[in-house]
Image (cartoon, grey):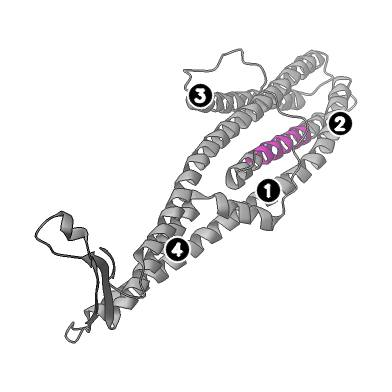
Amino acid sequence: MVGYSHDLLGYNPFGWEKKVEDQRLKAARCQHEYDLRLLAEEAAVRYFRLACKQRVLQMRLEEMYLNDTLLAIAREKATIAIVSLAELHSIEVQQQNAANQVEVARKDEQNARTELASLLRLEQLPADLALLSIPDMLPPVSYTSEEVVKLALSNSPAYQHQLAELTEARHQEYKARKERGINVGLDVNLGMQQVNNTFGSAFKNQHLYALGSVQFSIPLMDHGAAKKRHEKATAWANRQELASQEVERLLAEDAAVTLQKLQSSRDRLTSTEKTIKLAEETYNETADNYANGLCDINTFTLAESRWATAYTNYLTALEEFWVSHYHLQTLINYE
């Protein structure tokens, strides 16, 4: 005997369940890959943070050493009244400020060391750690904003999980809508039947029989329960729809902003590299001029400040570029 039974015609739960499970499976796979990429991104972020803090500390030390040299020269000149007492005090303040900036830079570098060592499950990094290398060639960016958003949505576990929740909500809304009116069920059986006194004879002269039934269920006195269930399911589906749109919006915003940061930081790196060369040449020339008495302390201080600002801007753009680069890889699953 074979048969077919369908409790509610027009509603197939297996089709909906397959959609939901397929989306949940994709979300689970995306989650695993996303977690690995997120770990790689965090490692890269901490690496480049330490690399930049090392270079800031190196810059501050060079400033302090040069100020120490100029202070020694100024003290010698003060003994023969070539340098005024006010100018000498200005250089001493400059030297003290440089020493304070070294302490701040050393603390920032130590914090970056601790963060990277913690992620690598190390007690601490070597005290004599050399400058971490930074690639000279920047990787190209060939994606458009639309491509980045599309890839980010496809590879986001949060978005895939939300799609699964939305599909399940639509499933429940569809089921509640079908149950709201007249419910029609179907039960059909088809088989062979024979009765005999002996077992062997029971398989002779089989008779075909068919049984079928159709059930109608009309909610005459449900006090609006079916209607309320449908309204509740509809409200939940609408809520999940809004939640999916919000996840999509935030993800698209993150992808677009990351791509913009990547492109803008690349442009800033090009301009700041030129600024650094010019500021460094001016700074060295001004230091020599001040040592030879060809300019005053204010001119030297201004040149030093401009050089430090240019180099700091360069390191900021460099760190932002690599942080954005690896975050974009996390979003779009690019190897």
The amino acid type of the residue labelled 2 equals Thr
Callout 4 touching callout 3 (CB < 8 Å): no
Badge 2 or badge 3: first in the primary sequence: 3
The CA span between labels 1 and 2 is 30 Å
Badge 1 marks a residue whose secondary structure is: helix
Q: Which of 155 and 247 is in front in this view?
A: 155
With 334 as the anchor, is 10 left or right in this view? left
Callout 2 touching callout 3 (CB < 8 Å): no
Please name the residue shown 17% across and 60% down the image. Answer: 202
Please name the residue shown 18% across and 82% down the image. Answer: 222
The amino acid type of the residue labelled 4 equals Ala
The CA span between labels 4 and 1 is 27 Å
Badge 2 marks a residue whose secondary structure is: helix
| Corner quadrant of residue 275 | top right
Image depth: mark 4 or mark 3 in front? 4
The amino acid type of the residue labelled 3 equals Leu
Query: Measured along the vertical axis of the image, is residue 233 above or below residue 153?
Result: below
The CA span between labels 4 and 3 is 36 Å
Is residue 243 visible to us here?
yes
Q: Would you name the residue on which mark 2 appears?
A: 282
Q: Would you name the residue on which mark 3 appears?
A: 120
Question: What span is colored magenta in the figure?
Answer: 305-323
Q: Nearer the viewer, residue 82 or 37?
A: 37
Residue 38: x and y, percent? 53, 39
With 1 as the anchor, is 88 left or right in this view? right
Q: Residue 243 carries which label?
A: 4
